Image (tube, helix red, strand yellow):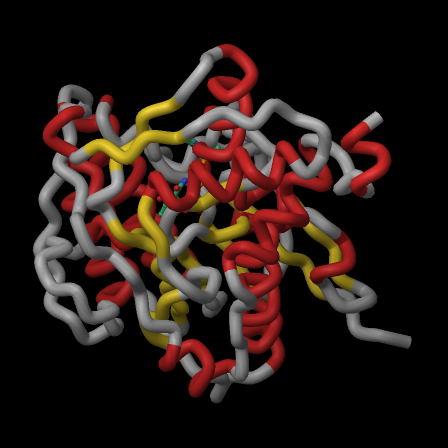
Amino acid sequence: MPETRDILILGGTGQVGTELQAPALWGAGTRLHAPSRAALDVTDAAAIDAALAQRPYAAVVNAAAYTAVDRAESEIAAAWALNAVAPALLAAATARAGIPLVHVSTDYVFDGRTEAPCTPDTPVDPQSVYGASKAAGEIAVRSANPRHAILRTAWVVSPHRGNFVKTMLRLAAERERLSVVDDQHGSPTSAGDLAAGLAQIAQALARDPTAPTGTHHFVNAGATTWCGFARAIVAGAARRGGRSVPVDAIPTSAFPTPARRPAHSVLSTASLTAAYGLRPRPWAEALDDILDRLVGPERTTTETQA
Ligand code: NDP
């Protein structure tokens, strides 16, 4: 009979947290627990301690975060509470309980000035409140719980909640043409693919005290700009019967936002492959799977013409 393992997932209503609850990602005998924010507020130290005392968790995966990048510029305390203080509390509590912690961070910890892909050793220099709060959360996790894995990711999309794919699909249905920034470079990432990686790492840490720890990057393979990504989304939707509208390239300066974003935040996944054998697939393939779920399967040429 397989051993039973309890895994605690935080942020279970989010893009990544929803995908983390797919039973197929976990071995037989795994019991997933994903309390809502109301049931477990990750900024509440006593609530975290009480949750961890309920059962001997084999691992905790933290996908809870303050992810409203622009709003964070004016809600600094809220962003830091969730992205810096909560990971500190979780890391300390899991360390006391002897549990590994798998935590998610972001490409926005980098300044984005160099074109070469960032490795986990590239110095961080966040340009926004969100990026700074996430960088502080990383430091807290590293310093409080040696049995941790931090996965930095970027441009996360999925069929769930609000995200770039869903926004582009809505705008393509509403407008005659779209304008999207073409001078920010990054790697779109499927929340489902990331969740599969997080689950594999959590299970490795849960069963093997010598499993690799540390900071790694998980993004789908390849790079594009937001404009390139938007064009792929519109083209993919059109192959599924959606409207095809032109997508015009604009500079970041034409679309000012409260938060500064890195111009180049392509992440190298080499250390992820070396540590865990994970090789994320190309972002365009992952996008196709998301569009299949959001729009439907691709149509044949005859169906499109009919
Ligand atoms: P979402 O914004 O989709 O989800 C955030 C989750 O955090 C929700 O489940 C939310 O619950 C939960 N949450 C918020 N406040 C609390 C609280 N006080 N206590 C408990 N839970 C809370 O995030 P994503 O899935 O997109 O992001 C997952 C991770 O990936 C985060 O660490 C994020 O920083 C990182 N990341 C995301 C990127 C992106 O493009 N989205 C890019 C790079 C990194 P509720 O439903 O109640 O609000």
Indicate the position of residue 165 as horizontal and vertical percent values. Answer: 50, 34
Instruction: Write down the quadrant of residue 84 in the picture.
Output: top left
**Along the line of sight, which residue is nearer the eye, 234 or 207?**
234
Instruction: Write down the quadrant of residue 181 in the picture.
Output: top left
Quadrant that contains the C terminus: top right
Quadrant that contains the N terminus: bottom right
Residue 78 position (above or below residue 196):
above
Residue 187 visible in the shown view: yes
Indicate the position of residue 223 as horizontal and vertical percent values. Answer: 37, 59
- Residue drawn at (82%, 42%) of the image: 300
Residue 85 visible in the shown view: no
37 left or right, relative to 299: left
**Along the line of sight, which residue is nearer the eye, 145 or 270?**
270
Indicate the position of residue 39 as horizontal and vertical percent values. Answer: 56, 28
Residue 3 position (above or below residue 152):
below
Total marks drawn? 0
